[in-house]
Image: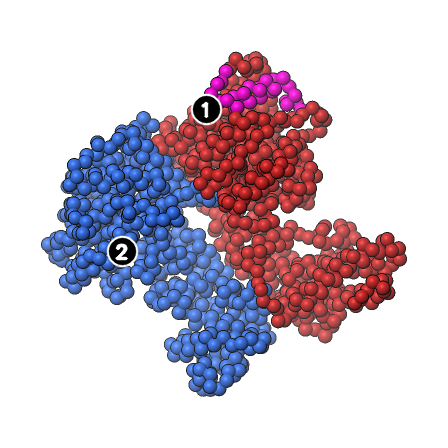
Chain colours: A red, B blue
Amino acid sequence: MDAEASPFETSEMLGTFLASTPLPKEAWRVCSTANAMGCGAFVVEQVGGVGYVAFSGIQQLPVPDWDPNRSMLVPLDAASHGPFALLKCHYDGEEPVMVHAGLLHLFLHYHPRPDLQSQIHSLLAETKLIVITGHSIGGSIAFLAALWLLSYLKSIFPPISVLCIGFGSPFLGNKSLSRAILRESWSGSFCNVMSTHDIMPRLSLDHSLVPTPQWQALIRFWYTYMMSPNSINFANLQLTEEDKAWLFYLAVANMERLVHAEEGSGGRSFWPFGNYLFCSEEGAICLDNAVSVNKMMHLMLRIGSPNCITEEHLKYGRYVERLPHQSLKRSFMEGDLSESSYEASLSMALNSMGASRQLSIAPIAKDCLKMTRRMGRSPNLKAANLSIKLSKIAPYNLEIQWYKACCDDSNEQRGYYDSFKHRGASKREFKINMNRIMLEAFWDGVVRMMDRNELPHDLHKSSKWVTASQVYMLLVEPLDIAEYYRSGMHHKKGHYISNGRARRYEIFDQLWIERVCRKKLGNRRTRYAGSTQDSCFWARVEEAKEWLDKIKRDSKPANRAPLWDRLIEFETYAMKKVEGLEVSTDVVAKNSSFSLWLEGWRASKSQIYPLKDIN
Amino acid sequence: MDIDTGSCGRELGIKDEVIKKACSISIRAHQAPAEKPFLVDKIRGSPSQVVIAFSGAWTSDAWSTRDGTAKAFGETEVNLNSFPSLRSIGNDITAKVNEASMNQFLQIMEKSALRSEMDKATRDSKPIIFAGHSSGGPIAIYATIWLLEEYKRLKKTLTHGPFCLTFGSPLTTDRIFCHAVRREEWSDRFVHFVMIHDIVPRILLAPLSSTKEFLEQSLPYLISPSAHHKADSIDKSKLTALFDNVMRNASCVASHAACILMGSTNMLLDTMTKFVQLSPYRPCGQYVFCTGTGRLVVVKNPDAVFQLLFYSLQLVSESESQQKAVASLPAHLAYEDGLDKNLDMRNAIHLENLCELPLSSDNTMDIATKTIVDTLNDLNLSARARLCLRAAGESEKQKEDNQKKIERKMGMIRNALDDLEGYRTMCETRGMGYFDAFKVQKHEDDFKANVKRLELAGIWDEIIEMLKRDELPDKYEAEKSWVKLGTEFRQLVEPLDVANYYRHLKNEDTGPYMTKGRPRRYKYTQRWREHAEQLPRGSCGESCFWADVEELNLAVTSNQPRNEQMALNVANKLKEWHAKGEVKKDAFLKETALVTWWKTLPDNHGAKLCIKDLIES
């Protein structure tokens, strides 16, 4: 066994903690208020220091005009320019982030409502903690609302925490959505509370289901109960045993498909994200690994039956009452416990799922939980180890610094960007390029570990890492840009900033902005900065060079005008940087491509628009 | 596993008779009139001991909040002037205690004869046992800490130092308090007795607002035997509601702590802690759990004690709730009889080797394991509870392993420091201070020194990271060898960091080194030394005066008015540090940044005169 594998299975302990807090009960209370208000309602409330927003589970899901041959998934950013503008929805080689068209439609209907907007904004002004919640489809709308709120907050960095709790909510988006949420470190903000046999969270609400009379009958029954939970009348349920079985096996088939779609063709199908809190009569466990969530949902259906499809979706009120009490008493365990801590905690998790007595699935469920076991070192130890690696790669950084200083001092006076871009077959530049590649490998490794959630999630707040990544970026990104234009990549892929920039830099940029926004420096610089403060400066110069060439060649005023504006804009920007001494000396070196551009631009400026140029 | 079927006292280093006496005085203390907040008694023997027992109070003005701004659990930071040790050193977090009980203690110190009683006992070299039952417990704890701080300040040995015994005391100290007490190695001087069915030790795990009524209106009458209230005079349904509430909160904090002990990395855990108010209080010192079967169980691991406080009172079935609730009050009043009986049974056991606790309750062969299994059963521990205890043990072991791991790196640190020492000597032969040589970065050696600097930074940052995440043993920051190495590292390497910072103009990117750019590895190691040598905070800046010199030089070049205060300060301190040998003479060589600045001073300037001799020699 891996000596550093985690010695405990924590999903059950985490489930117990969540269940013993007053939060699920409080969230459910607001949810049921929203449910009682009927179709399309929402409730905003403030209790103690916490703001609650709940969406009614009773919703008119739009169906009729769907094309049965198309997936219900639509790209999140194509659907709207507004709410999700700040969430990065496309990554190289991946499907775009997509969500259920009908659910998105419902959310987009809510989003512009002035009553919702104003109430949420007053919550944001008054509290630092916001819970967004909803039962059933209301929960899916809550997930979208939380995504919108998180992307909105990302741009203004207030110290506000968002928690989104769904109760038995159906699938919302694809694997890319799940990945995007992990990358933004938001998965701790999402939790779907799910009764182990509820079919709703297992369904894809698509054309093969939503228009059917069986589904309509079931949902009508649910809605009646949700609006007035005290007067349940099973006579209202117009479903035959066959209908129930049909719905049940539809859910089974759907889960089967998902479990098998796991790797590979997952892009176009639904995928879980965030946490799932599975609740049973025996207890609760909390999982955040999408693959095991899928498997677990699939497995638990095997011990369910068509009869549970009606009530399981309506049990949440009971669970939130029961769970806190359950944690006060000892859970009853059957059979011998293993003396290994890991095996024993695994058995307890199964017990809390109500799966330990089900011999048909217990072994598979066990394997499914084992998948989530952390095999390597703990994130904290990994981070500590990374500190050591960081110091090992430091010499590469230093050599590049050294190289920069040499270029900046050399008689050629063209700065290290141009020296590197136009380098010949020299040994020194070969070494520098190797260093650049080594550093790239290290930092990409860090980003990968962050994506896989293998590092502590507050790493991005540690000033050591933010500073180190910033120093790296300011020093090395100019070389990456030089390499990009040197190898002619801009002809193949387009300009660097929009097409060639590595994701690590975007992340580092974001980390840095978050910090700097909090503390602004007031003083003026006295000398040129050590490194140019905009690491993409050279990429902008390259683009400006192209515009200048074009404007010189093209004599049509209509074509010239937009180029002219862009050139003016760049010049203003660049001069502000230069005058503020925010660039490094290499930018203003006599023969640097920036100096050459500036010369060329000033010369042609007077020729092109002599009358306009007042300066 | 160490099985002592003998006396509990021998496990703890305190005689059984002393425990019994302290208990009975503590309970009698509740009867004493309000103007007499403590009782004093002597125990003959060699050496004879003095018992000081406090009554404390559950009265409303003491426990409730004076204004609306108070915290949900009534916690407040301790005053570091009275209790300088009660903080984490590197992380620099001040310990928190329950404000009301701390105020009571401060009142007693100020207004009663406690000081003179303490002085008298100390003069006669009689160890003092501070004791308290119920609300008297927290006062006894603070009194003990107060005296221990006194011993530390006067650098007295602890041979006749104080002890603290509490009986059914509520938790009133936080995680940092416990950390600091363990770091100072005072932990074994605190012994807390808890009847496993007693609700009071757990009561502050629930928010004050929910327990206030009970604490203020019911409990005081129960613990004071002068009033003729009996435990059964209290409304059973109210008591059950209180019990449920306290236990629900206990379950919440215990499972939260267990998630962390078990190494959960789920981000939801983080988010939830922002939304849910968790009690900050944690046990501190040794605990003795008294089971219903007459067994005494000694536990030292604070994480394990915390889990036990919840699990030993966990229900077997939901229907048991009222029965346990009703039993929880008499248990609070039964310490005297209960302890008398339990101590006489000589049935004490020390729960150690937590990582290897048996999980199941049967199938045991050897008698040693059987005793453990019986003990765990007596403590009412389910398999889940045992797993939590194992997790507490694993976490302690992990911390010790981490320390061993970094101790293996001491050699690497030594070597790198020796290399840099060599670099410093070489610079001197070049006629330059190594600060300035490094800042200019002209030679290959400067580059090599920079690589060494970064190598060391990596190792130290790893250590600091571990401290920040509480992954090293509590004692680590007080280990002499590390304090010494940290100081050497700081004095030698920090000047290079300052040089690097100003060489790359980072001050213009982010601000002055001292306020914006100083790495934690230097802040932490400076605090270690200041704490170890009991020096004022911020007094050991001998490694970073270069940053001030740089700022002063920058002010000269940019024609800003001179910061006279800073100038004088630097000069005076330099003189002092040089005299102690902490700043070497290479700082005063011909062309150093220091001398450049010094030359800009007018001849009659205080700062100029102050270090004139040093520079001109």
User: Which residue is outermost to the right?
Assistant: A555
> Residue at (65%, 57%) from the top-left corner?
A437
Name the secondary structure under disc 1.
Answer: loop
Q: Is residue B364 above or below residue B552?
A: above
Decide whether residue A208 is among the magenta residues.
yes
Residue A297 x %, y %: 53, 29
> Residue at (72%, 74%) from the top-left corner?
A411
The chain to which mark 1 is attached is: A
- Establish whether labels 1 and 2 are both on one chain: no
Name the secondary structure under disc 2.
Answer: helix
User: Which residue is outermost to the left?
Assistant: B44
Residue B84 x %, y %: 33, 61
> Residue at (65%, 69%) from the top-left corner?
A528
Q: Nearer the viewer, mark 1 or mark 2?
A: 2
Residue B458 x %, y %: 50, 60
To which quarter of the image does residue A151 belong? top right
Circle 1 packing at 10 Å, graded few (<14), some (14-19), many (20+), is: some
Give the residue number, with chain letter if any, for mark 1.
A358
Decide whether residue A182 is among the magenta residues.
no
In magenta, the rendered stretch is A207-233
Residue B278 x %, y %: 40, 43
> Residue at (17%, 52%) from the top-left corner?
B36
Residue A249 seen in the current view: no
**Which is nearer the eye, A445 or A188?**
A188
Residue B36 seen in the current view: yes
The chain to which mark 2 is attached is: B
Give the residue number, with chain letter if any, for mark 2.
B106
